[in-house]
Image (cartoon, rainbow, N blue to C red):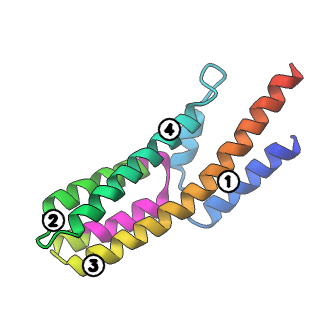
Amino acid sequence: MTVLQQQLQDLLASMYGEGLLDPQFEQLQALQDENNPGFVAEVITLFCQDTQRILTELTKYLDMPVVDYQKVDAYVHQLKGSSSSVGAQCVKLACVNFRQACEDNDKDGCLRALNMIKHEYYRVTSKFEIMLQLENRILSYSAKQQ
C-alpha cells in the first residue's frame, strides 16, 4: 500500500469515526471498478451540486413571510434521500430533525435545522474534497507506473 493509499484509508476511517459516513458509502465504493474508476467521484460531485441547489431553495422558502412547509419538506425529503445514497450519515440525520420541524410548522425549528444541515454538509464535503484529491493523485500515480 502506498503512502497515498494509506492517507486515503486513514481519512475514510476518520470520516466513519466522526459519524460523517455510514456503511452505505462502502456500497457506493463497491460499485466502482476498473471500467468506471471515477464512479464515486461522479456520485459525490452530483451529490454536492444537488445539495447546493436544495440548500439555496430551502433558504429561499424559509425567508418568505409565509412558509410553504409542504414544499420545504419535499426538498428536505429529497436531500435526505440523496445524502442517504452516498452514505453522508451526518446530513441524513440532520434532515430527520428538519422534517419534524416541518411537520410541526415550526419556522424557528426549520431555520435551526437548516443551519445544522449546512454545518454537517460543509463538514462532510470538506473531507470529500480531500478524499477526491487523494484518489486523483493515486490514479495519476498508478497511470505513471504502467
Q: Tag 2 or tag 4, which sits nearer the N-term?
A: 4
Identify the secondary structure beneath mark 4.
Answer: helix
Q: Which residues are magenta?
A: 84-99
Q: Are marks 2 and 1 in contact (CB under 8 Å)?
A: no
Q: Main secondary structure of the magenta part?
A: helix
Q: Would you say residue 94 sits in the magenta stretch?
A: yes
Q: Are marks 2 and 3 in contact (CB under 8 Å)?
A: no
Identify the secondary structure beneath mark 3.
Answer: helix
| Position above or below: 35 against 92 | above
Mark 2 to mark 3: distance in Å? 12 Å
Closer to viewer: mark 2 or mark 1: 2
Q: Quadrant for residue 127, please give it.
A: bottom right
Quarter of the N terminus within the rendering: top right
Identify the secondary structure beneath mark 1.
Answer: helix
| Position above or below: 118 against 134 | below
Q: Tag 3 or tag 2, which sits nearer the N-term?
A: 2
Residue under pointer 4: 43
Residue under pointer 3: 109
Q: What residue appears at the point 24 percent right and 74 percent down from the top-left corner?
A: 101
Q: Position of residue 117 (x, y in %)?
A: 41, 66
Q: Is residue 11 visible?
A: yes
Q: What amino acid is at disc 4?
A: Val
Q: Position of residue 70 (x, y in %)?
A: 14, 60
> Which label is found at residue 12?
1
Residue under pointer 2: 69
Most distant residue in the bottom direction: 108
Q: Position of residue 79 (x, y in %)?
A: 34, 53
Q: What amino acid is at disc 1?
A: Leu
Q: Position of residue 21 (x, y in %)?
A: 55, 56
